[in-house]
Image (tube, rainbow, N blue to C red):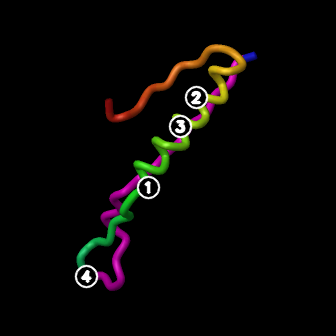
Amino acid sequence: MNRDALVVGINQYPFLKDTPTSKAKHLVSAANDAEAIAYILIQQIYSSGTCKLRLLPA
């Protein structure tokens, strides 16, 4: 059985602002959290079969 997962973590949102003229706000750890979730998933899938993990950007 093939298993696919897409985990996305985006830290930078150029349009996330308090006001139109304020500086853009960014998330602190979304990308790191997504990477951690991907590694947890990969450990679970490895225990039941084979899988590939590709992090972007590489």
The residue singled out by tag 4 in the image is 22
Q: What amino acid is at disc 3?
A: Ala
Give the mark nearer the N terminus: 4 vs 2: 4
Magenta stretch, residue numbers = 2-21
User: Is 8 included in the stretch rendered in magenta?
Assistant: yes
Q: Residues within 10 Å of mark 1 (few under 14, many from 20)?
A: some
- CA–CA distance in space, label 1 to label 3: 12 Å
Q: Nearer the viewer, mark 2 or mark 1?
A: 2
| Residue name at image x 40 percent, y 57 percent | 29
Find disc 3 in the rendering and name its residue: 38
Q: Tell whether position 46 is magenta.
A: no
Residue 39 to residue 11: above or below = above
Residue 27 lies in what quarter of the image?
Answer: bottom left
| Residue 42 numbered mark, or none | 2
Q: Amino acid at mark 2?
A: Ile
Task: Name the N-terminal-most of marks 2 and 1.
Answer: 1
Instruction: Name the N-terminal-most of marks 1 and 3.
Output: 1
| Residue under label 1 | 30
Asked whether the beta carbons under mark 1 and mark 4 sit within 8 Å of each other, the answer is no
As measured in the structure, the alpha-carbon distance from the residue carrying label 4 to the one carrying label 2 is 40 Å
Callouts 2 and 3 close, C-beta under 8 Å: yes
